[in-house]
Amino acid sequence: MSTLGFVMMCHTALDRAAQVARHWAERDCPVVVHLDKRVAKARFEWLKKELSDLENVKFCKRHKCEWGTWSLVAASQTASEMMLKEFPGVRHVYLASGSCLPLRPVDELRAYLAARPMTDFIESVTIRDVDWTVDGLNTERFQLRFPFSWKRHRFLFDRYVEFQRRIGFKRKMPEGVTPHLGSQWWCLSRQTLSTILTDPKRREFDRYFKLVWIPDESYWQTLVRNYSRNIESRSLTLSKFDFQGKPHVFYDDHLHLLKRSDCFVARKIWHRADRLYETFLDDSTSDARRAEPTPGKIDRVFAKALERRTQGRAGLYMQSRYPNVEWENGKTAAPYSVFHGFNELFLDFEPWLSRRLGTSVHGNLFDLKRARFAGDADTYAGCLSAAPILRDYNPEHFLTSLIWNTRGDRQVFMFGPQDNQRPGAFMASDSNAQISVITGAWAVRLFTANRNFSDIRTEAARLQRREVEFVNTLRHVRSRAEIRIWSLAEFLEEPMENLQRILDSIEGAQASRLTEAPRMADLTGLPKFLQYLKNQGMNPFAVGDFPPEGVAPIPDGANSRPYLVR
Amino acid sequence: MKAVRRYGLRLERKRFLVRAWRKSRGLEEIANRTDKIRDGDVLCFVTLRNEKIRLPYFLKYYRERGVSHFLFVDNDSGDGTREYLSEQSDCSVWWTDESYKRSRFGMDWMNRLLRLYGHDHWCLTVDPDEFLVYPFSDTRPIPALTDWLQSSAIKSFGAMLLDMYPKGPITAQPYQEGQNPFDIACWFDAGNYAIERNWDYGNLWIQGGPRARAFFQDNPERAPALNKTPLVHWQKHYAYASSTHMLLPRGLNLVYDEWGGEKASGVLMHAKFLDTFTQKAAEELDRRQHYAASAEYKAYADGLRDNPDFWTKWSEKYINWRQLEILGLMSKGNWA
């Protein structure tokens, strides 16, 4: 005696629907097929003929079905009534669609249900506790009226919703209705199903649900709460939805994933996934399992896909991800460090830092002559070219590409007022940037440069102007980088402590004390040079309050470095 | 966008369609098997000239991935291309000896054929050296992609052009008919692309890669565009505006997400840099039938003499689509 019956809602890929219906019917499960009325008559006849040799396949009255409307519930009602009437032996009715595919032998499902004869498997969640929907209409779908089709009359749909919101319209719910939502694919016991269908208040309920939005996700799910004695709030059908509320489709390459899920039925299967249909409709390969369905593994795959679509990969700019400003969800892919002025003050700063951090350190990436990649390479990760015009064509993109291409390796580079300043604003607004600035460090290089003083004076003024602009950008209220700014004089008061602080921030908890100091340029005579600049009418204020007697020279040789820990 | 500008684009689109009709009068039908096209078929549209050596592999590649019918415009080939194609049962062929340049680099012919035969089909418009790679392309055919796009109400699918090159001089390993070109040209640049937004048409403007690096160091703005939208659920009123880089109506160009997410996209692997290229470059320079007075080919001819090797130690060797996805050149979007 057949105890499990399938109600199939079909509208496309009828060959596949027929294949699955046959599979079930031949294994002694009666099937009632509902075919969307919008499907041409000829196709209906074809389907009927295809299944005509099977006595336990019936076709019910056809409704015109449209997504999100009452018609889908009406269709499932009609088909269920027919199932209960025509096949009195059926104890559980399973609602499936034409693109469903059984993943486990029917006998296993039958045994599973026979062991739980009074249980109704239907996902049913109260709207108070869970945000079920993806589109915002959560409680409102029960409180407003939805007479217009969302697919065909979107404009009217939206306007009418707005209108009802504005006038504060709220529908009265029929007594005994506590709105619940859930997947539309259920498996109900004869008792529950027949009580719902024969309830004297059914007309009232139906009238109410006709104007609820997407009633196929709420009609059964709500009413079942009134009658069922034992609800198992989950669907036996594996069915995942994406962020648009559209079901995910399974393909041949999901075979192993589906096998491992231990679910009984999956939806929706791509109609040309031959391998899936062949494998799962073939009983001979079955290895009896008693495992509970575990859709979790598949959930993870689709959750990832959803995240990829809505959040994307931070710091990636590409053909199908080009976020508007402030919508980047991370302007760059990873943290990086920018040192401004340090390689003017210290003679061997880059090799020193590289040794200290154990990573490659770039020179001035935005140098006007060429991008000074670590090791002075012509190209770098991702085939980025050192050619300056190419880089300056879109320097921000050059930077984001570099950070993206080297994910996993922290990028560290030098920057200075003589470089292309355009990426400055971008870096300042990037929370991944760690920018350390010594203002006025350019004075050190000018002071040692062998040039005409009038040239030096002009150059000093130019560099200072550019530097001030950069510092102003950094201090702007919108800047989000991790920023440290010292004037040269300030920095020299305790240089090693300052360096240590930057390194601590880069390396985090594992930072160790400095054991080797970078070699500082010889600053004897710098105060005089600065005074001379002032005398010439150019005030090098960025250097800070440099004492006229000069800073205490940092003596050479490790023995006399009190700031080092050995 | 101002109504005036919108109306301007509408007129522009109409102009393209009229122009396509006018230019199509020079097309001579060689083999028309379009009556074999069925509802829901994926179609492939190609303009070509003297590419016979590439065709066997090209046809094999797309047939295996579920393209049902090919529509070719042969621009006066002299190497047997036309004869070869007209023997194929799933190809329709038109011939013309009119100017490639004056038909907007073949786009007028394509627009006309698309309008006549592409309506309501997913249409792939590519060159014979472009090979579409899309998410799951090793396990799912193109119709799986187009079915999914359609059910997601997506009308166009972006695929950036990815220049592939061999290691060593490009003439070192000669290409044989029927061979997978990426057995030879299997290297590419993973991350040196610059993107601008084109506010007029709504598309992204992508430049970079080995060509920009090797030939356009000093005038990057002239480097060829790499953004393409080759796969479209075609409607009669659509038109390609500039090669397959831009479409009208402009909504079709929005193949990227603006709010931080990633849309699904693919890559057009470009098998241009094979030994056949040096000869082609010389010939095309001679014909002067290419974009911007063939500036690109001039640059190639110069560049090829000095430095015919694109390979660097940072070049990536092609493995599969997943690699391209991880590198961020394409995306699965929410297709899983």
Image (cartoon, rainbow, N blue to C red):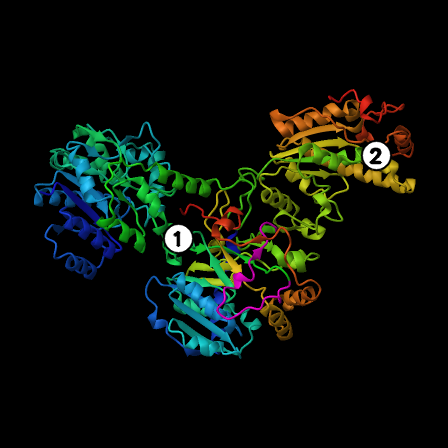
Specify whether B132 is left or right of A333. Answer: left
Which residue occupies the foreground of this view, A181 or B45? B45
The residue type indicated by label 1 comes to: Leu
Magenta highlight range: B169-192
Residue A94 found in image quarter: top left
Q: Chain of mark 2?
A: A
Query: Measured from the top left, where is residue B268 in percent x and y?
Result: 51, 58
Query: Measured from the top left, where is residue A162 in percent x and y?
Result: 36, 38
Magenta span main SS: loop
Image quarter in which the C terminus of chain A is found: top right
Q: Is residue A441 visible?
A: no
Query: Measured from the top left, where is residue B256 in percent x and y?
Result: 49, 49
Q: Is residue A336 visible?
A: yes
Residue A168 found in image quarter: top left
| Count of marks overlaid on the render | 2
Tell me, for residue B149, which label it has, or none: 1
* Disc 1 to disc 2, C-alpha distance: 61 Å
**Local secondary structure at mark 1:** helix
Q: Is residue A185 above or below residue A501?
A: below
Q: Is residue B203 above or below residue A475?
A: below
Image quarter in which the N terminus of chain A is found: top left
Which residue occupies the foreground of this view, A302 or B313? B313
Marks 1 and 2 in Cβ contact (< 8 Å): no
Return the residue at label 2.
A444
Residue A232 found in image quarter: top left
